[in-house]
Image: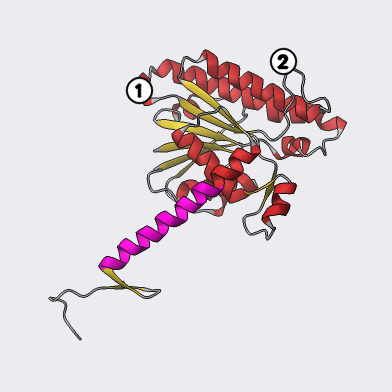
Amino acid sequence: MKLLLIGHTSLIGSAILRHCLSIPTITSVVILSRHPLSTAAGVPDDRIKVIVVDSFTFFDGDALQELEGAVGCLWQISPLALRACLGSLKAKDTGDARKDSIDCTIAAASAFSSYIAALNIPFEKGPFRFVCLNGMFPEDVQKKRPGFTTGSHKMKGEIETQLLALSKRSGNKFAAYIARPGIVFRAETRCPKLLLTMLSGIKVDALAICMVDCVIHGNPKNIIDHQELVDAGRMLLANMVDNDAERRKNLATDYNFDGNIHARRSTHDAIP
């Protein structure tokens, strides 16, 4: 299985990359980056391929060819746009934030959608999934909600509106999914569950596993709200722990397991 990842150096992007590499069925992670990288996010793995692009508003043939055989793309917004989402955007940065958050996102999604449409992928293989990290409280462009909108709310609302319209026009060849997390905490952050809920918080490992699951399997809803991410992340992480425990149990039937793994001797082993 092949995935594309844009935005791998952030807290969330790094967690997504680590989770992708923990899944044996993912055989290739193609990272589109504006800078050459010797080791992506400090994670050495021969499944990682880095393609350097000059801009996220224009993709040449080499970058677009990587879409062939890929099930989808995980798209992270830039740090500047993330500051806008958190309400710390200065007026002079609005143009840069718009370019990073709206122009780049829609340009990439449009280029990917057009290229995928030209590939004539069989219908039964499903659409190419574009999973975009956006954030809470986008302004509804049609209904103009919520009433306390800021520039960041409007930008997030515009991203969602354009992505969903692009998805609708694609004829089931391109599907856009938007994640709306609240405040993202590091996985090791010690925080009571009640306080995390009050802060509209989510651990980065829960968010990462949700986004990767969405790009692989899709989701019944195109927009995944914060609480849905929290609930799904908790369930997926629990399943991952259960699966790991089952794997260890199966391993113990073939090996003596006492905290370390010692190969069980056969009757033909030489005894020193």
- Circle 2 Cα neighbour tier, 10 Å, few/some/many (<14 / 14–19 / ≥20): few
Residue 243 belongs to magenta span:
yes
Q: Label 1 sits on what residue type? A: Glu
Give the label on residue 64, or none. none
Q: Label 2 sits on what residue type? A: Gln
Magenta segment's dominant SS is helix
Comparing marks 1 and 2, which lies closer to the viewer? 2
Magenta-colored span = 234-254
Left or right, residue 90 beside residue 72: right
Q: Which residue is mark 2?
A: 142
Q: Residue 9: tell me if it is visible.
A: no
Residue placed most toward the observer, 23 or 28: 23
Q: Which residue is mark 1?
A: 124
Q: Secondary structure at mark 1?
A: helix
On the image, the x and y values in percent for residue 198 come to 74, 48
Instruction: Check the picture and name the quadrant holding the N terminus.
Output: top left
Residue 64 belongs to magenta span:
no
Can you tell which quarter of the image residue 133 is in? Answer: top right
